Structures are given as C-alpha cells and as structure tokens.
Image: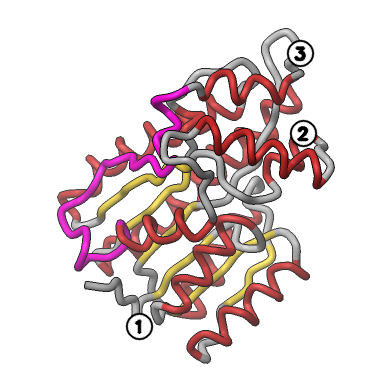
C-alpha cells in the first residue's frame, strides 16, 4: 500500500531546502494540497514550482520566520484562510549550533530554542484546533542529537531532546481527540546543514560525508528522501493509524555506533 494524500491539506515548515524540500516534493507527488513555509523567498518559490510540476497543484508559499510570534501567527492564519482546514502538520524547521558549555553564549541558546522549541510550540498550539476537527496528525522532525550525547551538541541537542518530549506529551493529550503525534529523528543527512555549521568547503564536506558513511552500520548517510518517506508513512492514516507518541530514528543504525566521536570531530 502506498500513502495517498489526495485532498489532504499538509503544512511543511522549513521547506525551502534540505529535508523540508524533500518532504514537500514527496507529498506533492502523493497528491497533497501543500502549504510550505521558509525564510528564503527565492528558494521557497523554486520549491513551490517543483511541487506544482508533480500534480499541477500550486502550493501556498508562506515566507515567514517561525522563531517569531508574527511568523507563527502569519503561517497559521494564512494556511487556514487559504484552505479552510489542516490535515497534517509537519514541523521540520530547525537551526543548528556547534558549541559547548565552555564556549557558550546566550545569544546562540536563544536563537536555537526560539526556532527549534518555541516556534514549534507556538505554531502547533495555534493549529491544534484545526487538527482536532480533521482528526489529523503531526510529524515533528527531530535528530539523533536529542538522544545521543556528544561534546559540541549544546544547545542543539538540548532543543531536540525537548522536541522529542514535547511530541510525547501532546501525543498523550491529543490521542483521545483523534490526533496522532509522531517524531522522525534523522541521523547524518545529506544537506547543507552541517556544511553551514562547520564552514567546510565543498571538498571538506564531501570528505566528512564519506567518513560518516564508514561509521554507519548500514554503510551510508541518509538522503532527504529517506526522511521524507518515513514522514509520509507516519502521516498516513492508512499505514500508521495506531501509531502515536513514537520517535522513529532514521539513521542507518548510527545511534548504536560511534556517533559521539563522529560529531565531536566537528568541534576541532
């Protein structure tokens, strides 16, 4: 059975690049009516065109910063005004940081938590009434950094651990109302995320990905499409009707190997 989101309204945050872009493109292929959110208008517009090319449905592209109350308010309002409903909320937006307590500053902490925790909390609370009406569901995108400890993961790892717990708490609260909540926790994934954090050149980044693949039991890093497929599986009522409160790790088994050593190399 293949997930089918025909006539389902799906909101994807952080959709202008990386994992969010892959999620948006897959849901477009699966027939969803999309609202996509990002801060980069140019990139978001490009993703919207590619989504429309799949099934001819033009996504609602919302340029907003979800670290701000105004950005969350705009996203929730524009989505509901345009579509009149919401079936699936995919909280993918996130920012990273590479630091440790000896180098920590509060500006970095606030920037990471404003997007990865507060923004998700704020947008979700505004859209829960619509999801209750539709008996919809939520998929949050976390990271194995939320469960695997490594030097240099402050405050990013903390924010993802908070997101995992947030997901479980609201899954319990919303289950009697017919709303499922699940989390996908990627491992090392091909995107510009790590490259931006480390200032690696393209050559250095490719070398790092190659080294990372050697540390992964299944032998390769994740693609955005790998993550998107799990998101679609969890968001599908046909495939995951009784799945809620889960944190599904898509990492090739990395959490069982030398993740600490791999991630700490980024701090050097």
Camera-side residue: 129 or 102? 102
Give how far apart the Cα atoms at labels 1 and 2 are: 41 Å
Which mark is on residue 103?
3
Indicate the position of residue 150 as horizontal and vertical percent values.
56, 18
Q: Sequence order check: which comes first, mark 3 or mark 2? A: 3
Give how far apart the Cα atoms at labels 3 and 2 are: 15 Å
The answer to the question of whether label 1 and label 2 lie on touching residues, with beta carbons closer than 8 A, is no
Give how far apart the Cα atoms at labels 1 and 3 are: 49 Å
Camera-side residue: 148 or 219? 219
Indicate the position of residue 38 as horizontal and vertical percent values.
66, 61
Q: Sequence order check: which comes first, mark 1 or mark 2? A: 1
Q: Which residue is mark 2?
A: 198
> With respect to residue 90, does 87 lie above or below?
below
- Is 255 covered by the magenta stretch? yes
> With respect to residue 170, does 242 lie above or below?
below
Which mark is on residue 7?
1
> With respect to residue 143, does 224 lie above or below?
below
Query: Left of 168 or right of it: where is 160?
Result: right
- Label 1 residue SS: loop
**Which residue is painted at 29% across and 71% down in the image?**
3
What range is drawn magenta here? 234-257
- Label 3 residue SS: loop
């Amino acid at each position: 059975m293949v997930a089918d989101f025909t006539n389902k309204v799906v909101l994807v945050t952080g959709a202008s690049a990386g994992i969010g872009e892959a999620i948006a493109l897959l849901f477009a292929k699966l027939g969803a009516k999309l609202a996509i959110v990002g801060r980069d208008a140019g990139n978001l517009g490009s993703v919207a065109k590619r989504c429309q090319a799949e099934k001819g449905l033009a996504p609602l592209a919302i340029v907003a910063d979800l670290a701000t109350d105004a950005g969350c308010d705009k996203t929730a309002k524009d989505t509901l005004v345009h579509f009149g409903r919401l079936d699936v909320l995919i909280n993918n937006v996130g920012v990273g940081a590479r630091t440790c307590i000896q180098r920590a500053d509060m500006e970095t902490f606030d920037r990471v938590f404003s997007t990865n925790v507060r923004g998700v909390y704020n947008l979700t609370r505004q859209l829960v009434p619509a999801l209750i009406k539709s008996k919809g569901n939520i998929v949050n995108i976390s990271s194995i950094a939320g469960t695997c400890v490594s030097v240099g993961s402050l405050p990013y790892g903390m924010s993802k651990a908070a997101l995992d717990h947030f997901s479980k708490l609201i899954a319990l609260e919303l289950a009697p109302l017919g709303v499922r909540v699940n989390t996908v926790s990627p491992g090392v994934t091909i995107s510009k995320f790590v490259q931006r954090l480390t200032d690696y050149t393209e050559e250095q980044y490719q070398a790092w990905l190659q080294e990372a693949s050697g540390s992964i039991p299944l032998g390769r890093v994740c693609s955005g499409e790998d993550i998107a497929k799990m998101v679609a599986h969890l968001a599908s009522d046909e495939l995951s009707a009784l799945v809620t409160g889960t944190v599904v790790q898509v990492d090739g088994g990395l959490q069982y190997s030398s993740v600490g050593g791999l991630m700490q190399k980024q701090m050097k």
